[in-house]
Image (tube, rainbow, N blue to C red):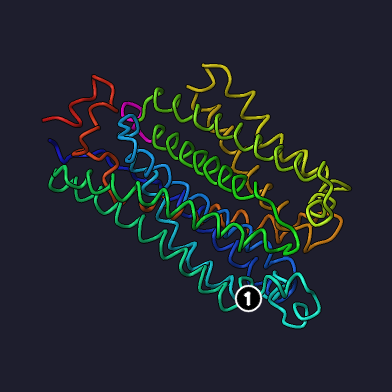
Amino acid sequence: MSNNAPAFTLPGSMWKTIFAFSILGLLVFIAGLFLAPERIWPNFLINEFFLLNLGLGAVFFIAVLYASNAGWAAAFRRIPEAVTSVLPVAGVGAVILIFGIHTLYEWSHETTVMMDPILRGKSAWLNEPFFIVRVVFYFAVWIFFARIIIRNSLRQDEDGKLEHTFKNVRNSALFLIVGTITFVLASIDMIMSLQPHWYSTVFALITLSGMITSSLAAIIILMVILRYSGLKKIITREHLHTMSNLLLSFSVFWVYMWVSQHMLIWYSNIPEETSYYIFRHFGGWGSLSFLNVILNWLVPFLALLPRASKRSDKILLQVSIVVLVGHWLDLYIMVMPPLMGNEPTLGIWEIGTFVGMLALFFGVVLRKLQSIPLVPVNDPYLVESLPEEEHAVALK
């Protein structure tokens, strides 16, 4: 097999733009620490969890491909592999988040816990030292699995041994179990515990489906970027079609979980549970909740039903951007109401940190794509993934 894989280079002007927006986000965060810590820390949590979703969702995508022996995505698998490179960055963000615990989580205040019997009952789990240990453990597990799976993939480019694929099948099967459990716990710890009296058995499925949907959207955006960079014969419209089907399916699954949680909680009318929606049903939050469903379900559902849309670079790019913004809004609605009160506020702290996080994400991922072979030339499934006229990329 050939070791000559296509390469990708981003123009210098684009790097300057990405760098400028990253610095903007950093400056907004630093300024917010001094001027509005009560707003900057919730926004940091939103963007930290958003970045985690993109990186970890890519690991799940790769793991499903390996565990199911799926070959259709081998030609562009390096894209989700590059997306996982943001996990260490998200890990650094989690360490920074520790300094905002007392601003975010009421269970971190001993006096509050002592006066609240419900918080006292949950204090064995919801306490600051154990929270920090768990978060560090979660990220260590995720980064470990991402590293070993991608290391085997890259080594296969060098020696062509099938044993790397077999190892990744085993590693991926294990990750799908361990990764799901740890992400569910992380969702409870980092997001659900913002309202520690509230609980939902469906919440983890909402965050899990949101993670997969947003990560698929990010991967599609990167696929379109690479297609415009000269890889249209490698990343084909058939690949886009399949990815758009996945994006459509998971957006429907997300709204199914969202509606299920809403109906179960609202109509059961248990005060500890309905408190979550009391915040989010009225005033500006109600309008944002309606917009949330439009962006995360209605737009991708209507836009991606026609076959032509699923194969259009332009439409897929636009829909994927809408889904990414929608997922950020979904996290914003999860995090902000108990911390900000009855009316949402969208200003420099929200927009600046979100733009900075997106610039950081694309900067890290695109730099990774420049440093690795874009096509896994020795992957046994590559021929299956490529159109017939491009088999020369995979075969001598």
What residue is disc 1 on?
127
Identify which residue, 335 or 223, lies in the foreground: 335
Residue 76 sits in quarter = top left
* Residue drawn where x is 68% and y is 36% of the image: 295
Give the side of residue 152 with respect to residue 244, left or right. left
Identify which residue, 396 or 57, lies in the foreground: 57
Task: Measuring from the top left, give residue 364's x and y in whole percent.
Answer: 43, 55
Amino acid tagged 1? Asn
Give the side of residue 157 with respect to residue 259, left or right. left
Instruction: From this view, report whether residue 237 is shown above or below residue 145.
Output: above
Identify which residue, 227 or 49, lies in the foreground: 49
Residue 55 seen from this side: no
Task: Measuring from the top left, give residue 183's x and y in whole percent.
Answer: 52, 55
Mark 1 residue element: loop
Identify which residue, 23 or 263, lies in the foreground: 263
Task: Measuring from the top left, give residue 146's x and y in whole percent.
Answer: 36, 55
* Residue drawn where x is 68% and y is 47% of the image: 330
Residue 385 sits in quarter = top left
What is the total number of numbered labels drawn onto the structure image? 1
* Residue drawn where x is 61% and y is 71% of the image: 125
Boundaries of the magenta span:
229-234
Instruction: From this view, report whether residue 194 is shown above or below residue 359.
Output: below
Instruction: From this view, report whether residue 274 is shown above or below residue 261.
Output: below
Give the side of residue 104 with respect to residue 58, left or right. right
Give the side of residue 272 with respect to residue 128, left or right. right
Residue 278 seen from this side: yes
Which residue sits furthest top?
Answer: 307
* Residue drawn where x is 66% and y is 35% of the image: 255
Quarter of the N terminus within the rendering: top left
Task: Measuring from the top left, give residue 297's x and y in whole percent.
Answer: 65, 33
For disc 1, the neighbor class at 10 Å (few under 14, some 14 to 19, many from 20) is some
Question: In the rendered structure, does residue 164 fall within the stretch colored magenta?
Answer: no
